[in-house]
Image (spheres, rainbow, N blue to C red):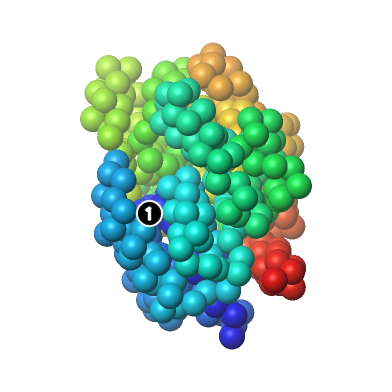
Amino acid sequence: MTRVALLSTSLARGGAESQIAQCAIALRRRGWETAVVSLLDPAAFAAELALEGVPVHCLAMRPGHADPRGLVRLIGFLRVFRPQILHSHMFHANMAARVVRLFCPVPVVISTLHSIAESSRETAGVELRDFAYRLTDPLADVVTAVSQSVADRHRSSGAARAAKLRVIPNGVDTSRYRPDQARRESARRELGIEERFVWLAAGRLLWKKDYASLLRALARQPDAVLLIAGEGPEGDRLRRQARELAVDARFLGAREDLPALMNAADGFVLSSVVEGLPMVLLEAAASGVPAVATDAGGVRECVADGETGFVVPRSECDALAAAMSRLALLPAGTRAHMATAARAWAVERFDMDTVVAEWERLYRELLERV
């Protein structure tokens, strides 16, 4: 049985981490011996992985601290597990996987890029990480990106070489995220929103998601309600802003029932300024929910402007508000057509089985070179 170690910077409730957990489970079910390793203490997915027989190992590192003991623990794990493939995700894990290869040979190392800018809001941080990628490039066999936009940005900066760069998108469980009228009616009753136009936004309350612009756009949507699923460091400020604007924005916190919330929504809205290939847009599409989204990262790769939703420029509140109004005022039949098209595209291109099959082909291709 081929052994694959999936190395992640963290295991929290986020799009990249969700993708790692889903891939690990799918690979395990397909006969690969998989293990997940997190640099930081796991905050999510450990129980789900354990139920599927996927072990989770923690390197006990701390956010913002370069701790060489974590690398020593990773080397120890690799010497025991002896994976044929070390597949890392996100910047810090990508760096760790490349560095430990100097001390513990692994036949295949793959680095996956999950965002167009894997850094803080500071430009210098992006440039520094691009330099680190260039410096350690020989230590990775292949670099993959979750969207063409992510691949293009890293290639143009020299952070990844075209010869070893591949695009494999995120995947979505289209059996879990699907239209369900009974679930829709139940969720809307529970939330007390039966007759309202309901927008849903989901994701960490961070600067990258630009919820501030979304709340200002919501102020121009008469009688609309916005459900926000997620939590994060900007939560208190955003709640104050919502009160000042007198908008009906309901902060639901971290939720485990996102498929039900997707069904409750009439439209999904994403206001990000930085993205990779947003999982929430794939989940919305699979659920048959038209979207309004800002043109960040690979958004245009999962929202067909005018067909499955509308794409607007980043950080332009007026454009976001206009697109939200446009979608809300469409005839019900037109929105239903958009929903059907979104679901069909998600199933065709982003179904998790399809994406995992792409990973399997890449793994086998690289193992044949060894």
* Dot 1 amino acid type: Ser
Quick check: 302 left or right of 179? right
Q: Which residue is mark 1?
A: 10
Q: Residue furthest front?
A: 103
Q: In which quadrant of the rendered image does the N terminus lie?
A: bottom right
**Residue under the image location 50 percent in, 59 percent down:** 102
Total numbered badges shown on the rendered structure: 1
**Residue under the image location 29 percent in, 31 percent down:** 234
Location of residue 337 (image quadrant): top right
Quick check: 229 left or right of 275? left
Location of residue 225 (image quadrant): top left
Estimate the x, y position of residue 137 in percent, counting from the top left: 60, 46
Estimate the x, y position of residue 357 in percent, counting from the top left: 69, 68
Q: Residue furthest bottom?
A: 1
Q: In which quadrant of the rendered image does the C terminus lie?
A: bottom right
Q: Is residue 210 visible?
A: no
**Residue under the image location 55 percent in, 68 percent down:** 106
Q: Nearer the viewer, residue 164 or 245?
A: 164
Residue 336 to residue 362: above or below: above
Q: Secondary structure at mark 1?
A: loop
Estimate the x, y position of residue 245 in percent, counting from the top left: 32, 17
Estimate the x, y position of residue 270 in percent, counting from the top left: 51, 34
Quick check: 319 left or right of 202? right
Disc 1 crowd rating (10 Å Cα; few below 14, some 14-19, many 20+) is: many
Quick check: 206 left or right of 32? left
**Residue under the image location 39 percent in, 75 percent down:** 55
Residue 138 to residue 332: above or below: below
Q: Is residue 365 visible?
A: yes
